[in-house]
């Protein structure tokens, strides 16, 4: 998605250790038009897979997942919670993943009332880096007896190996912008 790549080139900051700061349009402040375009682009890639729900992790995956759900005919979007609210009844689907930006393990929880056998799930997240968060979400899909039909990310950092790590799910994986190198303070996209 050229408009996304252009924004990464203009506003992205390489903070070192593989961390890309794109807070001006995705991870803190949202550019609604850009995210709407991202949602349409992801939806176009996965419409034929006929997802019935979209799953993401809070917080930064919610906006691109919602825009994708809207573009796919207003599909429900479920996000895995990191903290269990008192409104979430037991039992819940739980898995864990390491957080690159926060450090340590993060629990991801989804209520069975919003994820069931028979659902066709498209996972949409902001980043595909190591693949561990998306892998945890896929395991939650599996625990629910639902079918994983695809994985999409707004930005992929190929040098962290996430795509390879997720290959065992045997589903299509799509990224709208792919970063191949962030060494020496650079941000190199796949078309450079």
Image (cartoon, rainbow, N blue to C red):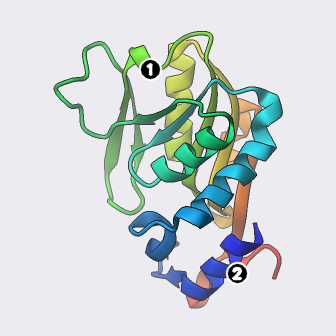
First along the sequence among labels 1 and 2: 1
Which mark is on residue 174?
A: none
The image quarter in which residue 81 lies: top left
* Residue at 77% in and 32% down: 170
Q: Look at the image and tell me in which quarter the N terminus lies.
A: bottom right
* Left or right of 124 in this view: 101: left
Q: Position of residue 160 (x, y in %)?
A: 61, 61
The answer to whether residue 5 is left or right of residue 95 is right
Q: Quadrant of residue 23?
A: bottom left
Residue 36's place in the image compared with 84, above or below, is: below
Helix, strand or loop status at disc 1: helix
> Would you place residue 51 above or below residue 178 in this image?
above
The disc label shown at residue 188, or none: 2
Q: Residue at x 38, y 67 (%)?
A: 28
Residue for point 66% across, 66% down: 159
What is the number of the mark on residue 114? 1
Q: How many marks?
A: 2
Q: Are marks 1 and 2 in contact (CB under 8 Å)?
A: no
């Amino acid at each position: 998605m050229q408009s996304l790549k252009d924004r990464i080139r203009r506003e992205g900051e390489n903070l070192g250790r593989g961390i890309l700061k794109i807070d001006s349009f995705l991870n803190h402040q949202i550019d609604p038009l850009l995210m709407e375009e991202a949602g349409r682009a992801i939806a176009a890639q996965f419409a034929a897979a006929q997802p019935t729900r979209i799953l993401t992790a809070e917080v930064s995956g919610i906006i691109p997942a919602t825009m994708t759900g809207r573009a796919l005919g207003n599909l429900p979007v479920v996000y895995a919670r990191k903290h269990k609210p008192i409104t979430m009844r037991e039992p819940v689907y739980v898995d864990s993943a390491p957080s690159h930006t926060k450090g340590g393990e993060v629990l991801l929880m989804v209520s069975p009332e919003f994820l069931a056998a028979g659902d066709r799930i498209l996972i949409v997240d902001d980043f595909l880096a190591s693949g561990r968060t998306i892998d945890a979400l896929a395991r939650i899909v599996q625990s629910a007896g639902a079918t994983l039909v695809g994985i999409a990310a707004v930005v992929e950092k190929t040098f962290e190996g996430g795509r390879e790590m997720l290959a065992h799910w045997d589903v299509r994986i799509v990224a709208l912008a792919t970063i191949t190198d962030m060494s020496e303070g650079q941000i190199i996209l796949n078309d450079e």
